[in-house]
Amino acid sequence: MGNLYKVFGGPAPTTAAQATIATGTAIKTLIQVLNATRTLRVVEWGISFDGTNASNTPIKCELLQTDVAATVTAYGAGDVVKYSNPSEDASTATLSTAASGYNASAEGTITATRVGDAQLVNPTTGYDMQFPLGREFLVVANKYLRIRVTAGASVNAYPYIVWEE
């Protein structure tokens, strides 16, 4: 078994709580991870929302592999959590605004995708998916792993991804 890593839709918390990220009302990448040299084995992903109106249109939530980067706020090394063992090696994910980060400001022009999971999630709830062992969603080296949403009304979200390298 490889090492597990986890990221959220913002920097790692210090003296304040984990930051939320606004969905906006256009299609938006909340998390993106690129590993230029290794395949990522997604073992879990999830998202929750702070909406207060259950009658709002459900939010389209997608876990994708894409071929083109979104422009994101780059993760720092400390934002990629060593999930399974705090003394393990750091992730080999590429950390830059065109690689791994959160809160996309530009989506890029995607020409190829693979969908790992897609759900309609009520804006007052959340969704979590753990893939069965041996049936995880694989994202090949040099492709982009994303959580992307499309919301009818903007709410705040807590997205996360756990993967194995």
Image (cartoon, rainbow, N blue to C red):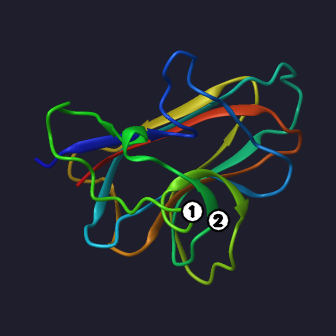
Percent across and percent down for residue 120 are: 69, 43
- View extreme (bottom): residue: 111
Residue 140 vertical placement versus 151 (above, below): below
**Residue 67 in view of the camera:** yes
> Residue at (34%, 44%) from the top-left corner?
131
- View extreme (left): residue: 1
Q: On the rendered structure, is 133 left or right of 42?
A: left
Q: Name the residue under label 2.
A: 71
Q: Mark 1 points at which residue?
A: 97
Percent across and percent down for residue 30 are: 63, 49
> Residue at (57%, 40%) from the top-left corner?
9
Residue 61 vertical placement versus 65 (above, below): above
Percent across and percent down for residue 24 are: 83, 46
Circles 2 and 1 in contact, beta carbons < 8 Å: yes
Q: Label 2's element?
A: strand
Q: Which amino acid type is marked by label 2?
A: Thr
Q: Label 1's element?
A: loop
Q: Which of marks 2 and 1 is nearer the N terminus?
A: 2
Q: Which amino acid type is marked by label 1?
A: Thr
